[in-house]
Each structure stands twice: as structure tokens, then as C-alpha cells.
Image (cartoon, rainbow, N blue to C red):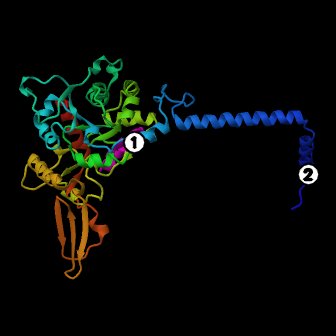
Amino acid sequence: MTPSNDSTNSRSSVLQNYRALPLGILGRSIAVSGLVLLLFYAFLSKSQDNPFSDSVNLPFHFQWPADSSSTRVHNTTMESPTNISHIGFIVISSLNSWRWRKAYIESWWRPNVTRGYVFMDKEPTQEFLPWPASSPPFQVNADITKLRVFPRIANPLQVRMFHSLLDMYRVGDKDLRWLIMCDDDSVMFVDNLVEVLGKYDHTKYQYIGGISECVKSNADFSFDMGFGGAGYAVSYPFAQAISTKLDDCIERYPYLWVSDHMAQSCFADLGIALSIEKGIHQIDLHGDISGFLSSHPQSPLLTLHHFDTIDPIFPKMDKFEAIRHIMKAAKVDQSRLAQQTICYQRESNWSFSVSWGYSAHIYENIIPRSILRKPLETFRPWEMERSRSILHVQHTVGV
């Protein structure tokens, strides 16, 4: 296609203007352009090193503690592997709930080995004393009624739970790499937690947890939220970084109803996203969860939550006997606990699905793995009406 005379004339005019540009002006233009590019590059470099530089439009002023990427790499390569002494557990409880829930915690707590505290709403009364060595030592939460925003807080109980992260940091225990928050009706598989956390760089800002098994629960809150009852972990440097901002987060989100949603909202504002681990189980289910546990994925079993709202995980046992029973298998080989293995005996036309240390299923025909990996629906979904009644009971007793 031949260009029109108008476009040709226009292009010629531009070229003539460019050729007529004095060399001095052209040189200054190039110098200014180079300076702008240099400043832009410096800004990008600063933003990558510190994603919360003053130029970013945040709802608050925030600056990370000074450290360098080179220091982090050096520390990671020089330090010893993560072990159980590097983890501090934050168990959220109350005097009203501890009476019947301490058996859950004592099933996995290892006196003089595991580190951490049970955080109470108030000082234990005489009936709880002397405090048993089989339980984690206790701490009393800070008085959140002294917060300026307290009159506007929608759910003080949940704010106390979230504030326990700051209370734990203020205790000042040394040489911790991770803090793990959990409820007092959760069971932790400590050896597996050590193994999984060991693959993360604890010198960086980390937020690790699991989402709910119930789509409705995730939709109500977030698909990127670590559900706090089952437990979520933060690296110690991250806990240190947010220690001066946690009260600001509460002031920003006093209307939020649950602590883990408040935590996730706060962490998201700071630019830290959730790293999901499949073995952290909120168990937003009811009834018999044997079908769910029998189809556990090939990832370490880390936590189980909501033992108050499900049937005993082994038949003909009460809840506490069932927990002690699975812990016997955990002591033998925790890394393989509940890992589903599928195999076939084709001569007999049999299929096997074994969840190590928990269950074994034999089928008298060949069933594809895609079907055997799907959980047997022995459980009921997390019904909203029942969930509300449980929340009401928990709020009443001060869980």
C-alpha cells in the first residue's frame, strides 16, 4: 500500500525536526533520560529488597527490620538443621475449656522436650494447681481491654487469641525459629512438623498453614488463610517484624469475627502470603471422619483439629482413647502415619488401600487409583447451623 501524501509529509517533517535538533540539546536530553532510567532502576531494586518502602501506598507506615539477603543465605547454610527445640507452641485455651481439653494436648506434648505455653484468659484457680508437668507451662494473656479499640471489638475472645502471638513473642524465649499457633482441641504430630518446617528458610518471613476441608468455610473467610484451630506457623523473624504492628492490625480490623481471619488480613497487608501444607487439617467436618483419614494424601500428617465435634477416630473407643491409640503408631514411624498406599493382587482380582497406622481396606475387584484416592463420605459436611451453635457455646465458655 502506498502511503498518502499527508502521512509522507508528516513523517518528513518529523525527520527534519529531528535533524535540526542542536547537538547540545540532544546531549542534555539523553543525559536526563539516562538519569530517569537510573533512578527508576534504583527504585525497583529498593522495592524488591524491601517491598514495604515508603513509596508504596500502604494503609499504615511499615518498614522491615534491617537485614540483607546475603546474611540470610549465610545463616541458612551455616546453621544446624531445624529440630524440635526450635519450635515454640502457642496453645490457646481458657480455664473453662482446659478442664476437659488438656488430654488432647497432653497426648502429644513432651515434657522437657517440646517448648511453648498454654495461654489462659486468667490466672489458674486452686483446682488447677499444682500445675502438672505433663501439660505445657501456662501464661496469662495480656489485658486487651487496655487497647484503645477495645470498645469497637466485635469478638474480644478471638482478639485475645490473635494477640497471643504477640504475648508469646514478648515472653522472650531464645533460639526459636518458628512459632506455631493452635487451639486446645488440636493434636500435633511434632516429628512431622519438624521435618516439614525444616524445608523452609526460617530466616525469611514465612506464614505456613492449611485451608479448610469445607469449601463453604474457605469461601466465608479466604482460600489463602491458615485456619488457626488446626494451627499455623510463622517464622520467628516474621513474628519479630509484626510485633510492633499487631495492635495496629487489631485497630484496623476490630469488626472481624475470628482470630485467624484477622491474622491473615494483617499478614496480607504486610505482603506475606500463605504457604499451604496439605497435612494441616482443620477438620471442618462432623461425625465419622474415618473415610477422610483413610484417603490421606502422600504428605506428612501434621495436625488434626475439632476433636470435640467429630466421632472417635477409632470405633469402640472414646475420643481420648482413640487419640492415645493413634499416638502409638506415631511413636513407631510418624513420617508414614496415615499415608495412603494403593496396590493390587491381580491374580485374585483384589485391590488394597492402606492408610499406615490407621486403616486397611480390601476390595474384591480391581478399582482404579483415581477412585480409591477419593475419600469415602463417612462424614457429614460442616453445617452452618451447627457451626453457629458451636461458636455460641465456645463464646459462652470462653474457649
* Badge 1 amino acid: Met
Stretch in magenta: 201-221
Residue 352, compared with residue 139, is above or below; it is below
Image point (30%, 25%), residue name: 170
Disc 1, disc 2: CB below 8 Å? no
Q: Position of residue 334 (x, y in %)?
A: 21, 53
Quick one: label 1, few (<14), some, or many (20+) residues within 10 Å?
few
* Element type where label 2 sits in the image: helix
Disc 2: which residue: 8
Residue closest to the eye, 339 or 381:
339
Q: Position of residue 250 (x, y in %)?
A: 36, 26
Q: Residue most toward the front?
A: 78
* Badge 2 amino acid: Thr
Is residue 359 visible in the rendered image? The answer is yes
* Element type where label 1 sits in the image: helix
Quarter in which the N terminus is drawn: bottom right
Picture quadrant of residue 387: top left
Picture quadrant of residue 25: top right
Disc 1: which residue: 78
Image point (26%, 46%), residue name: 282
Query: Is 206 covered by the magenta stretch?
Result: yes
Quarter in which the C terminus is drawn: top left
The circle on residue 360 is: none
CA gap, disc 1 to disc 2? Answer: 67 Å
Query: Is 203 covered by the magenta stretch?
Result: yes
Quick one: label 2, few (<14), some, or many (20+) residues within 10 Å?
few
Q: Position of residue 354 (x, y in %)?
A: 20, 65
Q: Is residue 278 left or right of residue 345?
A: right
